Image (spheres, grey):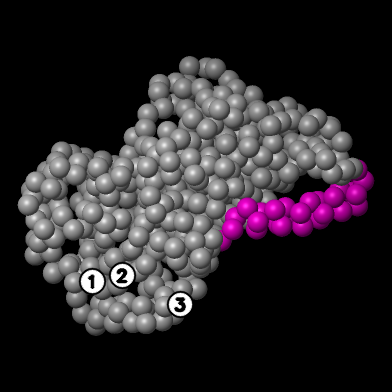
Amino acid sequence: MESSGLPGNQNLHIAIVGAGIGGLTCAIACRRMNKNLKVTVLERSAEVLPLGTGIHIPPNAGRVLAHLGLLDRVKKEAAGYQMDRFILHRYEDGQILADKPVRGRAQREYGSEWIVIHRGDYHAVLLSEARQLGAEILTGAEAIGAEQSQLSRETVVLKGGRCIEADVVIGADGLWSSLRETVLGRPFSPTETGDLAYRGTFPREKLLGLGNEKVDRIIEQDNLHVWLGPGRHAVFYPLRNRTEYNLVLLVADDLAEGVKMAPSSLEEMNAHFDGWDPILKDIISCQDTPLKWKLLHFESLDKWTKGPIALLGDATHPTLPYQGQGAAMAVEDAAVLGLLLARSLEKGLPADTVEKRDYLSALLQLYQDLRKRRTETNVAGAVHTQHYYHLADGEEQHRRDAELEGLAGTGWQGACSFNWGDAEYQRSLLGFDVIADSKEKFEDWWVSYQEAGAKDGLF
């Protein structure tokens, strides 16, 4: 252990509200990086179930999983596979606008593979790993808020009256976070984006049953396909060793204000895509019992922390899904929190209760400073992608398509007004090493914190 001039109690109790991808990754990061971080995860559901559809683990998140010793396990146990190519199609006829190679190039350029996986399988691996590492997972534990004290530890208040004390509280409770109101001191709801999504998976047999040779060829490949069109787009790719396939249809929101989800019909989905590529229409016909979900986000949330309470993931920066980075940003948040808390224990914490609380509050402010600009850039980037995906036919659409057509000739190293094709933007998004960045920034901050404390006569 490095000496620091800050003697004290070398253990911390971390209460994480929410057992989603971000919450469980935070639990794993804490326990993996320092066994003296005691972790309790509070999950409101009676059982943590492997729910969801397809999800991406882009290279920036893959780096984190590799650092935590999880990437190989995720690929093996959850049938995660490397995306081969990322293909953009014109909506009317399926014409390929761009065919971006991913397999191999992602590792070379961004430092990790680009994995596609079923969310439920990914979540199940994280849950198992968190438990194996000694995190306590409490189900049926719905947090309704947190109480703060200047003189003692924080208290998470659960529905029914039970209270959990901890040194640090992390709100990883998603889009409708109860901890967000504690941090902000007021209610704060996400903003409607104008889009909704039909999401679903269906078995390989349904697609084979179409008897369409073009569809048969598509389903044998590990490619992600996106059809771009006026005001809407469609996404399709395989899951679970090509035994299932994921389809997401993004269209204009027609749900009433405040309605988050509603049942739909195959006829309604099909009507949104009249005149589109016949191959896509055949794929859509394989879907059944569709639900439609309103898409929401925050343009900005200025306050992420209040004392030793912090928010992560969708609780603080929900985004449109158009860059495949929602869960990845939560994973990055989780890794930063685990690293900052682990390094603090290695350095040594103040023995005095009030001084320790002040230190942890300052540490979480550092977390916000490290994460805020990057996550805001991602939210803005997803809105930018929405615009370029949904261009109406016309001059701007022709410029977009011409730029996309020229990208392969640059070896995917050129500039592009559409961030999907811009090499510099993609490197900053996908090649970012959040672990290395946080280690460096923590050391600089630690020196400044010590110097300020010495100046004030605190140690």
Secondary structure beneath dot 3 equals loop
Q: CA distance from mark 1 to mark 3?
A: 19 Å
Residue named by callout 1: 96
Residue 448 located within the stretch drawn in magenta: yes
- Residue 18 at what x, y percent from top left? 49, 33
> Which quadrant: the N terminus?
top right
Q: Is residue 420 left or right of residue 317?
A: left
User: Which residue is at 56% across, 39% downward?
Assistant: 26
Whole-Å distance between the Cαs marked 1 and 2?
7 Å
Dot 3, how many residues are within 10 Å of its Cα: few (below 14), some (14-19), or many (20+)? some
- Residue 333: tell me if it is visible: no
Disc 1 marks which amino acid? Ile
**Amino acid type, residue under disc 3 in the picture:** Gln
Labelled pair 3, 2 in contact (Cβ < 8 Å): no
Alpha carbon of mark 3 to alpha carbon of mark 2: how far? 14 Å
Is the stretch drawn in magenta largely helix, strand or loop?
A: helix
**Place of residue 316 in the rendered image (x, y in percent of width and height, measured from the top left):** 50, 47
Query: Residue drawn at (53%, 46%), measured in percent from left and top?
Result: 65
How many other residues sit within 10 Å of disc 2, few (<14), some (14-19) or many (≥20)?
A: some
Could you tell me if the residues under marks 1 and 2 are in contact, i.e. CB atoms within 8 Å? yes
Residue located beneath label 2 in the image:
99
Circle nearer the N terminus (3, 2): 2
Amino acid type, callout 2: Asp
Residue 275 tag number: none
- From which residue to which does the magenta span run? 432-459
**Residue for point 20% across, 41% down:** 203
Where residue 291 sits: x, y (%)? 21, 41
Frontmost residue, 205 versus 401: 205
Q: How many marks?
A: 3
| Label 1–label 3 contact, CB within 8 A | no
The quarter holding residue 10 reads top right
The residue under label 3 is 413
